Image: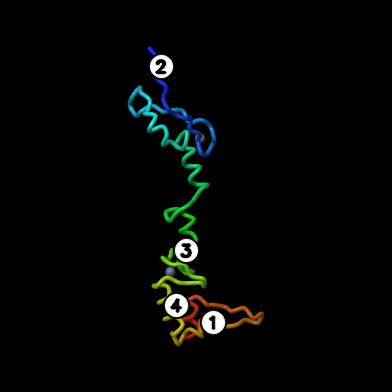
């Protein structure tokens, strides 16, 4: 009986460059089909994970997310990119009301060395009273 030769080429792991061994089907003694084997890119899930972490592309990876703007106050990730420092809506609201607050100036003063001192709210009350 002649041996059946499968029209196949060995696959090499994208990460470690070793030949990928044809794995067994789950819960079975049989190997996966050569068709399935041709779709394999990695020798195991570890190489898959390592390769993915090195080749971050596309919208779903963390690189894309980290390039988004973050709120400068609460560090919440914002949906858009900005070239300037930004706040999220709720922090912006707080920031605005703070600036328009007549007590705002009392919370800020210059010390002798020229540094701006921003007093904590509880100290602010002291300076007003
Ligand atoms: Zn590998
Ligand atoms: Zn915020």
Does 70 appear above or below 13?
below
Mark 3 residue element: loop
- Where is residue 1? Give x, y as percent: 37, 12
N-term mark: 1 or 2: 2
- Tell me the residue that label 1 is attached to: 108
Residue at the image position 54 percent from the left and 82 percent from the top: 108
Helix, strand or loop at label 1? It is: strand
Q: Is mark 2 within 8 Å of ligand 1?
A: no
Spatial CA distance of label 2 from label 3 is 57 Å
Of callouts 4 and 3, the N-terminal one: 3
User: Which callout, 2 or 3, points to the residue nearer the camera?
Assistant: 2
> Depth-wise, is mark 1 or mark 2 nearer the camera?
2
Choose between 64 and 105: the one closer to the eye.
64
CA gap, disc 3 and disc 1: 31 Å
Question: On the image, numbered disc 3 is attached to which residue?
Answer: 68
Mark nearest the camera among 3 and 1 is 3
Look at the numbered disc 1 and say if its residue's Cβ is closer than 8 Å to ligand 2.
no
Residue 3, numbered label: 2
């Amino acid at each position: 009986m002649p041996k059946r030769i499968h029209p196949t080429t060995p696959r090499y792991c994208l990460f470690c460059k070793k030949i990928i061994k044809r794995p067994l089907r789950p819960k079975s003694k049989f190997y996966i089909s050569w068709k399935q084997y041709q779709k394999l890119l990695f020798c195991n899930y570890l190489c898959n994970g390592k390769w993915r972490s090195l080749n971050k592309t596309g919208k779903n990876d963390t690189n894309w997310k980290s390039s988004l703007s973050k709120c400068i106050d609460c560090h919440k990730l914002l949906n858009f990119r900005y070239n300037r420092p930004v706040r999220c809506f709720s922090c912006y609201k707080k920031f605005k009301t703070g600036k328009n607050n007549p007590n705002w100036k009392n919370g800020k003063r210059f010390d002798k060395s020229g540094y701006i001192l921003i007093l904590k709210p509880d100290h602010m009350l002291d300076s007003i009273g």
